[in-house]
Image (cartoon, grey):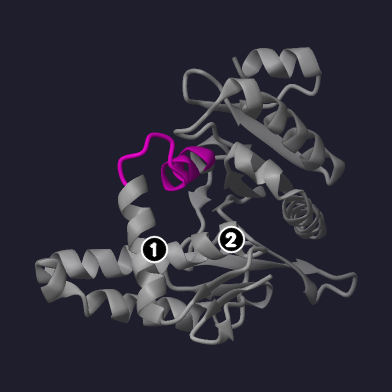
Amino acid sequence: MPIVIEGSELTSANIAQVADDVKLAVLGMESERGWTKEKAIEQGKNAKIKVGKYFGTHGSEDVTFSTVREFAERLLDELSSGAKAAGSGADREQDAADAIKGVVASGRNLPSWVTKEFSKTFEDLDPDIYAKNTSGKKDESCTVKADVLSEHGIGVVGPPSKFDKKGHTRGIFKMLGEVARSHEKEAHSFIYRGQKYNPSTDVEKIVSLTEWAREFNVTPWVEVSSGDFVKAESDGPKLRAQLK
């Protein structure tokens, strides 16, 4: 069930080109939206970045856009609705990076162990990080999009709703664990509460997410009431106490 834009499926192979097309489409909206040139450039850059996030969130869904412009407008709508939302993913990525003494991943922010051989970078988009095979070469079959990176680890960041896409999320954890292991690094999963956090349903989702992460040797982190990320307790009652 793919994301289809102008009749073509959005994939990791063409996402960089689509992101560029989205940016151009947004720049073309300057007059009708009454933006200054600077505002249009900013919106274009933000929409371009959003392409990767949208793909990561909706990649397993059946979504169709008749034109790139229609896709760009959807991204702008999501950016607008989430711009001032507390606990948005972009905000939390920086907090996650700080927790592992690392950086928010981008083509310009790669630790020394992520060489060109083991990465595929895109301007303003999350990089693909490849596993190292037993011969020390790139394993094309094992890759993950990194949200945060450090000299000692690699991580992904997401909300409790990741639980709702069990197969997709477990697949990410599996790849993340394998990529990290092959480079002798630690894998991390950061679960933030988000604006719509509902303890009555989200606590158990987060508990399950931490369990899935551990199955694949991924260290789970959770957001506590102070807004900080802490390593999730492995004991169920203690973990639930963290999530109050």
**Is 165 located above or below residue 36 in the figure?**
above
User: Residue 175 got which mark?
Assistant: none
Q: Residue at x 58, y 46 (%)?
A: 157
Question: Please, which residue is most extreme toward the bottom here?
Answer: 7
- Visible in this render: residue 95? yes
Which quarter of the rendering shows the C terminus? top right
Asked if 223 appears above or below 79 in the picture, the reply is above
- Position of 178 with respect to 143 (left or right) is right
Q: Residues within 10 Å of mark 2 (few under 14, many from 20)?
A: some
**Stretch of the chain drawn in magenta:** 83-96
Residue 58 is tagged as 2
| Disc nearer the start of the sequence (1/2) | 2
Give yes or no for residue 90 being in the magenta stretch: yes
Please tell me whether residue 212 belongs to the stretch shown in magenta. Answer: no
Callout 2 secondary element: helix
For the residue marked with disc 2, what is the amino acid? His
Quarter holding the N terminus? bottom right
Q: Quadrant of residue 120?
A: bottom right
Task: Count residues near mark 1 (Cα–Cα under 10 Å), then give few for <14, some for 14-19, many for 20+.
Answer: many
Look at the numbered disc 1 and give the secondary structure of its residue.
helix
Horizontal and vertical percent position of residue 44 = 29, 70
Could you say which is closer to the camera, residue 76 or residue 36? 76
**Location of mark 1 (residue):** 75
Q: Closest to the observer: 112 or 27?
A: 27
- Identify the residue at image location x=23%, y=76%: 27
User: Label 1 is placed on what type of residue?
Assistant: Leu
Q: Of residues 99 and 232, which is closer to you in this image? A: 232
Whole-percent x, y for residue 234 in the image: 79, 23
The quarter of the displayed image where residue 40 is located: bottom left
